[in-house]
Image (cartoon, grey):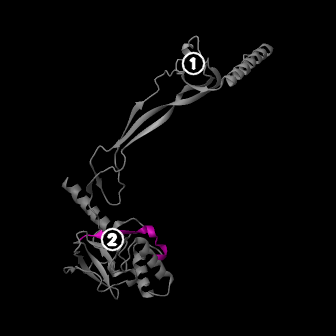
Amino acid sequence: MKRIFLISTMITAASAAFAQSQCSQNSPIYKFNGNSSAPKEIHHLGSAPEFPFLRNKTSAHELYMAIKKSERGNMNKAAMSELNGMLMEIGYADGAQDLRESNISMQYLPSGTEGNMGSAGYTYSYAKLMAPDPQGFKAWKIASPSGNATCNLYIMAKCGNAFYPKTATTTACINVPVNLTGDDSKEVTLDGASVQTTTDKVYVYYHKRHRRRALSSDYADLTDPKASTPILVSRTDKMSAVPQTYRVTVSTPSNSVQVCPDQTLDVATNINVEKESEYTGYYPKATSKNYKLVSRRVYRKTLHKMRKARRKEHRVSQLTGVDVNR
C-alpha cells in the first residue's frame, strides 16, 4: 500500500510540472526558478502600472475592447508586444488576435496568493498579495484556451499589471441558502373534454286585466300575477367546456446548496400537483328564461305569426319527411 502511494505522488508531481512547462517557455512571468527569497508583500496597487491602457476597467468587455484597440492601433506597441508574448505562451498562437471576450472573466485573488507580478518597464518580481479587502484584489482572468488552470494569466484590475500565481488559484466550495422568490404556488385551469349546455329562452307576454286561470308551472318564475300565457320567440343553446383546476407547488428538499467555481449549480426541486376541481360526470342542462312585456296588440300579432309559422313548418315536414327543428 505504501509503494502505491509513493508512485501516485510521483505521477501527480510530474503532471503538475508538465502542465506548468506548457506556459513557462520564455517570459519571466512564468518562471519561478530563482525565487528562493521571501516574496514582496503587496498591500496596495497602482504605483507602477505595467499596462496603463488596461487600468481601472469595469467589465470583461471593457478590458477586451481595450486590448483589441491597442492591437489594431499604433499606440502601445511595446506593451502589446509584451502582452502578446504572454498570451502566446499560454496557448494563444497569434496572441491577442486569437483572444475572445469569453476567455476573460472577473475573479478576486485572495490575500496570501503568491506569484510573479509585472510592473512598469516590464520587470517582474516575486510577490505576495495582501489585499485590505477581505475578498482580495480584483483581477481579470485570461483563461488558457487549453483549459489548463495552471496556465491562466491575470491582469490586476486597479493597476493593469500582469500577475501569474505560483499555484493555480481556486475558490473553495461553499454552502449557500436556497430561497425561492416570487409565487411558489400557481393555479392552473385546463378545459375538460366534457361540455355543459345552457339554454337561453326569451318569451313575450302582455298584462291582462283579468286572468281567469293560473299559468302552467313551467312559468312559475314569471312574477306578474296577470300575465298572459308567454310565447317563446327565441331559444339559444350555449355549450362550454367543463374545466379542471390544479394547484402546482414548487419547493426545495434542502435549505442550502453547495456552490463551486466553474461548475454548474444544480438545485433539486419538488413539484407537487394537486387537483382542486374536476368533472363529476353529470352536468344537467341549465335553462335561463327571460320575459319581455309587450302590448296586447303586439302579443296577438306575434301569436298569429307564430301559429302561421308552425303550420308552415308542419307542411314542410309533410313534404320532406324531415322534422323541422329550428
Residue 198's place in the image compared with 312, above or below, is below
At label 2, the amino acid type is Gln
Name the residue at the top extreme: 213
Q: Position of residue 135 (x, y in %)?
A: 25, 68
Q: Nearer the viewer, mark 2 or mark 1?
A: 1
Q: Earlier in the sequence, mark 2 or mark 1?
A: 2
* Residue drawn at the location 35% of the way across and 60% of the way down: 262
| Quarter of the figure that contains the C terminus | top right
> Quick check: is 44 in the magenta stretch?
no
Looking at the rendering, which quadrant does residue 64 occupy? Answer: bottom left
Looking at the rendering, which quadrant does residue 58 occupy? Answer: bottom left
Q: Where is residue 143 in the image (x, y as percent from the top left)?
A: 39, 69
User: In the figure, is residue 262 to the left or right of 37?
Assistant: right
Residue 212's place in the image compared with 2, above or below, is above
The disc at residue 20 is 2
The disc at residue 226 is 1
Q: Where is residue 148 in the image (x, y as percent from the top left)?
A: 37, 66
Distance in Å between CA atoms under marks 2 and 1: 106 Å
Tell me the element at label 1.
loop
Bounds of the magenta segment:
95-110
Q: Where is residue 311 in the image (x, y as percent from the top left)?
A: 75, 16
Tell me the element at label 2.
helix
Which residue is nearer to you in this view: 300 or 290? 300
User: In the figure, is residue 203 to the left or right of 105?
Assistant: right
Residue 291's place in the image compared with 216, above or below, is below
Residue 272's place in the image compared with 129, above or below, is above
Can I make out residue 118 in this image? yes
The count of marks equals 2
The disc at residue 295 is none
User: In the figure, is residue 284 to the left or right of 22?
Assistant: right
Mark 2 neighbour class, 10 Å CA radius: few under 14, some 14 to 19, many 20 or more: many
Can I make out residue 91 in this image? no
